[in-house]
Amino acid sequence: MLEGIEKPETQAESLQNVQPQTAGQVNNQGQETVHSIVGEAVSQPTAEEQEKMQLRLILKQTRIRSDTEVPEEKYTLSVTDTDGNETPFFVRGDIHAVKAKAKAGKTTALKVMLAALLKGEQFLLKSLVEDARIVYFDTEQSRADTKRILSDVAKMTGLGSDVIDSRVSLYSLRCIDQEQLLPLLRQAIEDNKPDVVFIDGIVEFVASFNDEVESKTLIKNLLPLAQDNDCAIVCVLHTNKSDDDHNMRGHLGSFLTQKAATVLECKKEKGSSVITVSCSEARHKEPAEWSIMFGPDDTIVSADEKRLQIRKEQEAEKKQKQAAAKEAKKERELQEHLSTVLPFINSTGGSINRNELIALVESQTNQHRTTVSRHITALVEAGKLVENGDKVISVAAVQTT
């Protein structure tokens, strides 16, 4: 019985001895956990420090050093000038532009580029990509006109529909909402893996080409799209309506000009149907100009010789007009000189000593003596006055004698 009574007491005493020790251990562990949490919190970078870390990372990734390795630039097309020199253009991984006034031949020029990419060369253009693949977005024309792109290319190249359709992904998007166009472009590039992308009507990708933020955002989206997919993206945009203004329209045109590696301009030769494509801006060497037109059977043909002929005729016409203008100016000046000296000659009966005439004109008009003498000589040479010895005679006086 005593043992039974004493046993619980011993257990209680034992518990009393143990409880302070367990509580101490718990407290110590709690303190260690708190210290650990506080330590981790203190060691975590602040929002400002995180931002700086991110900025430093971007700077590190974007810095170019002397030993930085960058991929070699790969071009998609080239043009040969009259001396046989070949200049590449439309580099991959970048954006480019084709500009013109309305109905000045932008789409026709794109057809020739498309033909060169498919066939290997067309007129002065040459493809620098083997078996090039093309995505073509047409946001402006009807489906019939869009399809005519393929038929015109077939006429130029002689290629069959199987070859063209296997390498060209052409889309008629005039009726598609603006918000869908960029996502559709991304999907088309992802699915088709093109070497070149033509966007005939980039203005449809924005609600307003004068919206600065929207225009800048679009160009900023196109740049990585071209770079990440190693393709050349060619954007077509109208220039301002004024004949003398060749800038692309609005903020969209300004940002596109700033960022484009190459800007080509299509212009019709004055008084003809010849379309000339020239380079207005380029980061490197400008490609030579080239010309095209529609032949009698509506086939696109080279017009480089025609352009040279037109320019030669225009230059001759310009010189002729300049000569006529110069002659007209000379005649006006002679008439002015004649109206100055003739009253003095007539006041003396139509004949006067040359030196006396010079003195009279000099005193009355404040012209220098040598100037007056030169004018009289010019009038005599032009047959408007007659000089006989030291006498200057008016033509009228001669005719009445």
Image (cartoon, helix red, strand yellow):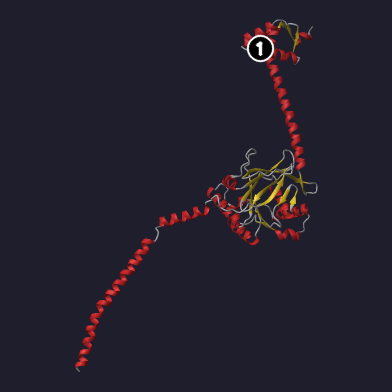
Check disc 1 and give the amino acid type. Thr
Residue 210 in percent (x, y) is at 56, 46
Indicate the quadrant containing the N terminus: top left, top right, bottom left or bottom right: bottom left
Going by the picture, which residue comes out furthest to the bottom?
Answer: 1
Residue 224 in percent (x, y) is at 57, 55
Q: Tell me how many marks there are.
A: 1
190 or 253: nearer the viewer: 190
User: Could you say which quadrant of the image residue 264 lies in?
Assistant: top right
User: Could you say which quadrant of the image residue 399 lies in?
Assistant: top right
> For the point 41% across and 57% down, which residue is it?
47
Circle 1 packing at 10 Å, graded few (<14), some (14-19), many (20+), is: few
Left or right for 375, reference 33: right
Indicate the quadrant containing the C terminus: top left, top right, bottom left or bottom right: top right
> For the point 21% across and 92% down, which residue is it?
3
Left or right for 67, reference 74: left
Left or right for 198, reference 307: left
Q: Secondary structure at mark 1?
A: helix
Say above or below: 132 vs 8: above
> For the point 77% across and 58% down, which residue is it?
160
28 or 361: nearer the viewer: 28
Going by the picture, which residue comes out furthest to the front?
Answer: 67
Left or right for 110, reference 261: right
Residue 292 in percent (x, y) is at 74, 45
* Residue holding disc 1: 370
Say above or below: 277 vs 18: above
> For the point 73% across and 26% down, which residue is it?
323
Residue 126 in percent (x, y) is at 72, 50
